[in-house]
Image (cartoon, rainbow, N blue to C red):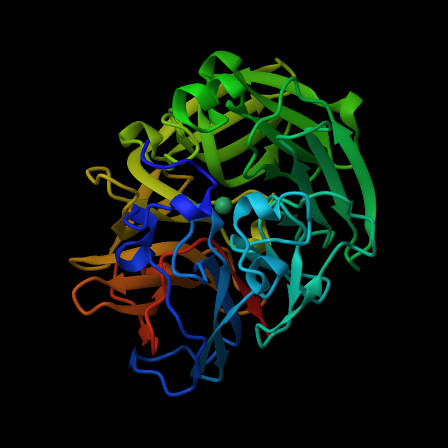
Amino acid sequence: MSQSLFDKDTVDKNAWHLQGNWGPVEKELESSELVVKGEIPEGLNGLYVRNGMNPRSGYSDHWFFGNGMLHGFKFEDGTVSYKNRYVKTPYYEKDLDVMSSFGDLSASPANTHIVKHAGKILALEEAHLPWQVDEELETIGVYDFAGKLNGAMTAHPRICPKTGELLFFSYSMMAEPYLTYYRVNATGDLIQVEPIELPRAVMMHDWNVTENHVVFMDLPIISDMNLAVETGSPFGFKPECGARLGVMPRDGSNSDVRWFEIDPCFVFHPLNSYEEGNKIILYVCKQKEAMVGGFQEVYGGDTTIGRLWKWTIDLELGEVKEEQIDDAACDFPRVDDRRTGLKTDYGYCMTLDTNAESLTLGNHAHKYDLVNNKRFTHDLGKNVKGGETVFAPKSKDSDEDDGWILMLAYEEETEKSKLLIIDSKDFESPPVAEIYTPQRIPYGAHGSWMPK
Ligand SMILES: [Fe+2]
């Protein structure tokens, strides 16, 4: 290990997350005169925003700790404009590092995801409170659900398309409760808070929601001071601690949680989950292990890359069936948000390069037909790397899969970024539009389509 983690003064400025298109951009810009190849669909009206790490000072001590920068594309009747803005939290204003931000729940990097619920747009990072921004991406302020949220909020809440509820959790690697469940009604009132018992503190990046249940993932990235001696970081992968899925009714509490053992693994991101009779089906990007060299090792070779797996939890028999669906490396999977927690026949994901020395995005996007176990490939072209695949339906009432895939891609040779619009029904054909931005967009995290 060449540096001590979390110490901004000893940052390795040659770290992978500061090189090439992982490195930050300097300017906040806006433009409505973008170079567009192809035609922007007339019916695509709304805002696509993607969040990601963009350290203000030019460097951060870990990929996860850069300042959140939002990249927004506003679509209106076949036209598009672009704008990027930092999320201006105390972490940004005071240019804090992660150690300085601990203890202040408002001092968020706000760099991981952005969602819209009950008319409010929230920028999220899992160790702090949400930050509200407006449709112009300007920061409004910290958001704590009228004082009812007293802990961090995951960057991966789920909005139920049937009830309009926002479901989320909070985890802590510092103190009990290590896990807390929250439910917010369709109008934005936080109506339920449930502490959930875990045997130990674990890192819990994402989770699963179905029509009647939530499923927590107790997976073994743990906090252990012995690891700090071995790897320089107190967080790391300990498969001997086991792995479990915790199924709870959405209005349930700790005593209602049923835990199911699974093979030790790690999942950053599930694709979707749903109920089928007495079974709960989960599609996840599962990796054999994670952070094997400590917290600073986001990528540690092939075993730390996700593949699509299906977990079937049989609530009657009390067991979990684990099946690998595909061997292609993938992550950041998405479905049509209107199908969150409901049966989905299709999923979309970005790919990863399995031969690289550091985390490297792939030059393909994949679409899965989950009913027929079929994979479709969209080739981005040589030396073009693409990020998360966000689905925008062609209309409010269009069928699942009848939509556009929005994917930010980077051309390594021209050093230009572009937003691709791919027809989901014609996934393997070239994009219908490629929208170039006035400044490159660093590889980042998650985004959302917010229809008008
Ligand atoms: Fe994530």
Query: Is residue 142 rendered to the left or right of residue 309?
Result: right
Query: Is residue 430 rendered to the left or right of residue 219?
Result: left
The quadrant in which residue 324 appears is top left
Residue 62's place in the image compared with 309, above or below, is below
**Residue 285 coordinates in the image, percent (x, y):** 42, 36
Q: In this orientation, does residue 346 appear? A: no
Q: Quadrant of the C terminus?
A: bottom right
User: What residue is shown at x 61% (from left), y 44% (from top)?
Assistant: 127
Q: Nearer the viewer, residue 96 or 192?
A: 96
Residue 84's place in the image compared with 353, above or below, is below
Q: How many marks?
A: 0
The extreme front residue here reads 9
**Residue 329 coordinates in the image, percent (x, y):** 30, 38
Q: Nearer the viewer, residue 243 or 139?
A: 139
**Residue 298 coordinates in the image, percent (x, y):** 38, 37
Query: Is residue 206 rendered to the left or right of residue 334?
Result: right
Q: In this orientation, does residue 163 appear? A: yes
Q: Quadrant of the N terminus?
A: top left
User: What residue is shown at x 53% (from left), y 20% (from top)?
Assistant: 225
The extreme bottom residue here reads 33
Q: Nearer the viewer, residue 130 or 347?
A: 130
